Image: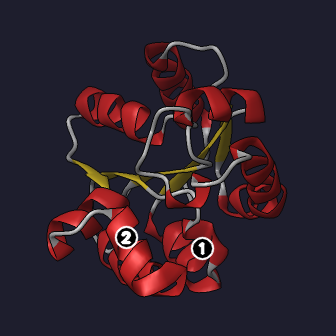
Amino acid sequence: MRNLILVGPMGAGKSTIGRLLAKELHLPFKDSDKEIELRTGANIPWIFDKEGEPGFRDRETAMIAELCEADGVVLATGGGAVMRPENRLALRNGGRVVYLHASIEQQVARTARDRNRPLLRNANPEKILRDLLAIRDPLYREIADLVIETDERPPRMVVLNILERLAQLAPR
């Protein structure tokens, strides 16, 4: 396995589960959004405010291309990373892709107090999450080697499930 890449919506647990997987596998953990923030010295909401979503997505595409060239990392991506075809190709070619699926209700609960979600700065975050999932779910599934449900499951159980299912996959 070259890299282990986690995709999925906001609130699916990509960062939490990614850190645990990296520890279990003795690999470095990278979060594409955090890497962008480290490189720019600015947080994601500020980048959205100053450059708009297209500016952020350009930075994200460059970061994903770079991180997918790594060898032996656990990578958590932003929820919208799959929107660009070039990102999906880089992710698919970068390693094993695990889609962490979470219900809308779980996403709402997990993101309710997070102020670092520019796309949820709205009176109706549930509608936004529902609309985003309708568009993104097929794209997550298109590149996923595994689809893992995270609803109401402790992160450690999700990690064990991922490791068990990865062991059953044929090499590619």
| Residue 22: x %, y % from top left | 28, 37
Residue 147 shows up from this direction: yes
**Image point (54%, 77%), residue name:** 87
| Residue 134: x %, y % from top left | 84, 56
What colouring does the structure picture have?
A: secondary structure
The label number, if any, that marks residue 68 in the structure image = 2
**Image point (42%, 75%), residue name:** 49
**Other-residue count near label 1 (Cα within 10 Å), few / some / many at <14 / 14–19 / ≥20:** many
Q: Is residue 52 above or below residue 123?
A: below
Residue 149 shows up from this direction: no
Q: Quadrant of residue 37?
A: bottom left
Q: Is residue 49 above or below residue 140?
A: below
Q: Earlier in the sequence, mark 1 or mark 2?
A: 2
Count up the numbered dots. 2
**Image point (59%, 30%), residue name:** 165
Q: Quadrant of the C terminus?
A: bottom right
- In space, the residues marked 1 and 2 are separated at their CA atoms by 11 Å
Q: Check disc 1 and report the residue beneath it.
A: 88
Most foreground residue, 66 or 72: 66
| Residue 86: x %, y % from top left | 56, 85
Q: Secondary structure at mark 2?
A: helix
List the single residue furthest toward the front: 123
**Image point (77%, 55%), residue name:** 137
| Residue 138: x %, y % from top left | 81, 60
In the displayed structure, does residue 90 sit left or right of residue 63?
right
